[in-house]
Image: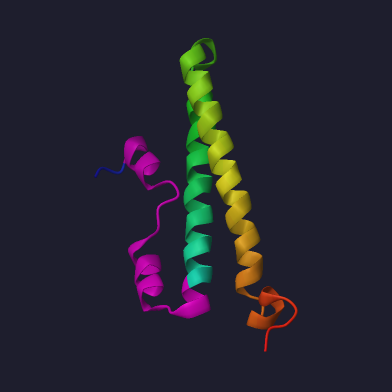
Amino acid sequence: HGTGTNAAHMMMGMATPLQMAALAAAEGREFDRQFLQLMVTHHGGALKMVDELLEQSGSAYDPALLEFVNDVANDQAAEIERMTSLLATVGAEPWAVAGPGYV
């Protein structure tokens, strides 16, 4: 891997070795929280890559490319929304997530 633009694109949204080590050491709710945060960042990286692709000269004139990047952007945004919602429950106490009747 070089240090140029291509290396930056490959790393966009990817977890660092330190983050992966912390995730491997985590358990239970802490693992869930870290995993979801890393995945939100990962999917955010895909959205940033789509934006940068669309900024390239001529990209707006390719209908197949536009359809593809719109699909990617919609899918990634939906995943971010779903994982952000899950993150809100990870920090909650088990009985708050389980609802009435949990003992």
Q: Residue furthest top?
A: 61
Q: Nearer the viewer, residue 10 or 43?
A: 43
Residue in the image at 30% along x and 44% along y = 3
- Residue 19 seen in render: yes
Look at the picture and state if 55 lies above or below 28.
Answer: above
Look at the picture and state if 33 lies above or below 79.
Answer: below
Residue 11: x percent and y percent? Answer: 37, 47
Look at the picture and state if 9 lies above or below 23.
Answer: above
Residue in the image at 35% along x and 43% along y = 10
Q: Nearer the viewer, residue 83 or 50?
A: 83
Q: Residue furthest bottom?
A: 103
Residue 14: x percent and y percent? Answer: 40, 52
Tally of numbered tags: 0
Give the extent of the magenta segment.
4-31
Q: Is residue 40 left or right of residue 99?
A: left
Rendered-image quadrant of the C terminus: bottom right
Q: Residue furthest front?
A: 101
Residue 23 magenta-highlighted: yes
